[in-house]
Image (cartoon, rainbow, N blue to C red):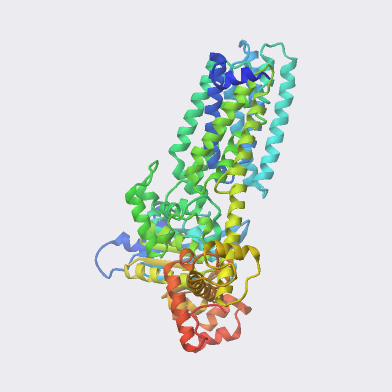
Amino acid sequence: MSQASLHQLHASPVEAMQGEARGGDRQILNALNVRGLTVSYDRKPVLWDVAMSVPAGARMAIIGPNGAGKSTLLKAALGLIPRLSGECTLFGAPVAKARDKVAYVPQRASVDWDFPASVLDVTLMGLQRQIGWLRWPGASHRAAARGFLDQVGMADFADRPIGQLSGGQQQRVFLARALAQQAPLLVLDEPFAGIDAATEHAIIDVLHRLSQDGRTILAVHHDLGTASQYFDRALLLSGTVIAEGAMDQVLTPAKLQAAYGGRLAASQLEAFAAS
Amino acid sequence: MDPGLFLSALTLQAGWNAAIVALGAAALGAGGGVVGVFTLLRKRALMSDAISHATLPGVALAFILHAVLGGEGRSLPVMLIGAAASAALGVLAVQWIARRTRLYEDAAIGTVLSTFFALGVVLLSVIQQMDASGQAGVASILIGSTAGLLFNDALLIAIGALVISAAALLLAKEFIASAFDSEFAQVSGLPVARLDLLLLVLVTAVVVVGLQTVGLVLIIALTIIPPAAARLWTDRALAMVPIAAAIGGIGAYTGAALSASGPNLPTGSLVVLCLFALFVLSVLFAPARGVIASLRRQWVFQTRVHERQGLLALARREPIFDWRTRSLLQRRGFLRADGSATRAGIVAAAQMTQDQALWNRFRDLYPDEAFSLPDWSLRPIGDVLPEDMVRRLRRDLTGVAASGGGATLPGARS
């Protein structure tokens, strides 16, 4: 089999559609497309043959028990950790060539908050592309960064050292930094973990605005109770994909049971059966 | 040591050569400080230890080859090339071990640096049995010396240090971004792996350039002590750069001048001791994290606690027994000598009660947040929490008062 035909065989629907690129019924371009993704740590597969498509404009949650590989899926899709196999595309382009299309909110605990930086310094890191290599941020960049801080209610904290922030404030700063990237896809890793309710509301407000703006949102989400409130699509993950699709079709007792096994209380399952 | 000679060396009056040596050392110290800031922030400070020890076999081999091929005496450029080559080999060895085995980098560094150093010492003993001139000069790279330093050597060191600093400064923003959050930096388009490699190259360059004066055993101090001291002075990464450069430059300059003030004084050791003196000064006096500053903050903190508790007691019309609280409230004009509240005291007490009620509500609703907040109930709540949060608490509090308690926020943990 020639290489070209091999490629066609593996091409995602989006790529195939682009290949044809003539009128007919137009499919919406996927913001993120993952096919056949396998990731392992030391020969122990964490993700096995995972496929996921995030339609442009969707608000999608990745849901699953601890150790399901949710964060690993995000990182592998963004090219931050090596993948054993599989391909990922951002808006139809290979991830390495489309990094400007994605903004990222990593887990809060992934950095050292004792690092010598102010809130504004961290936000300015999101403007790396606009500022450019070997250049220093100018007055316009600072003003822009303050604007993004204002969107998350942190404008008054711009000059604080980040070491003085509470957990919720740290999360707001990370969101401001991602907003500064001004990308059509926003990827968040556990954005609501260990934060106060006010911050959760502030983040949801921002995500809501972005969504109305036509941006795509993909988040690892822990709380089954709020998932359907905050997101419209879900990927249920437990090493492999259990289900993917509209929220009400994914969060069914049978599928949750398959993903969580005995780890979900019967009362929680009943809640989903009732709704 | 001759104090007069030290003073004249310090003021560049001890002759052309001593002046050049001191200035070269200052440039080297500044360059080590600048590069060290970025390795410290990237948490790879010990890498420079592996690099410096890994230079020894290269230096010795270069000397042997130079002598065997008929070169006269020791040639600094040849030795530095040998140093750079074996340092690069050492870095590769560390990275290979860390990647191929499941050992952490510190274990790999320890293995590589001791092995390379041992190999270098063996080669040094070979050199001592050779019939070649300049043997003493090779041994001096262990602890450093300025005695045999020529004008051209010092110039080479100064120019090298300046070039290294300039390169590091040019990429300061990128280095800082990848040090704070390498994954985010990668997503925002920075080639983090290449930046890491470049940083190691810059550290290697500092080590190689500084071998002659400071010596390979101690050169790690140039890239660690100045940035560590600078961290105490500021909470901004970029501000650490000039501070570390100044500390490194002053320390190395003073150390070089000291070693020029008498025969056979070990330059490297004196430079490190001078750097340490500056480090101690920083530990004591630095405003951001120094000991005295934190004692002062502790005092301010206690004052706040006493003032707040005193005012709250005043609002509850309780007598105040603590002498410190009493004298504080009297000095503020809140309390009369007989223990009764002044008009200003009553107003302040009412405000404090209101503020405390908001803080208490915050703690009830978000216990985790309140715990992790260093300023909980110590400063006016509006100075600590975002405006929307304070509004929410205030609304919530009036709601509680109206409904007789029991109202909670959606999603609040109890």
Foreground pick, B212 / B402: B402
Residue A115 place in picture, x, y as percent = 54, 51
Asked if residue B212 shows in the view, the reply is no
Foreground pick, B67 / A212: A212
Residue B117 place in picture, x, y as percent = 70, 31
- Left or right of residue B367: residue B121: right
Given the current orientation, which residue lies at the most extreme front position? B338
Determine whether B246 is above or below A76 in the image.
above
Determine whether A28 is above or below A261 in the image.
above
Residue A250 place in picture, x, y as percent = 48, 78
- Left or right of residue B111: residue B95: left
Name the residue at 66% across, 69% down.
Answer: B321
Name the residue at 63% across, 79% down.
Answer: A262
- Left or right of residue B120: residue A18: left
Foreground pick, A73 / B127: B127
Foreground pick, A267 / B323: B323
The tally of labels here is: 0
Q: Which part of the image, by quadrant, shows the N terminus of chain A? A: bottom left
Asked if residue A200 shows in the view, the reply is yes
Residue B160 place in picture, x, y as percent = 50, 26
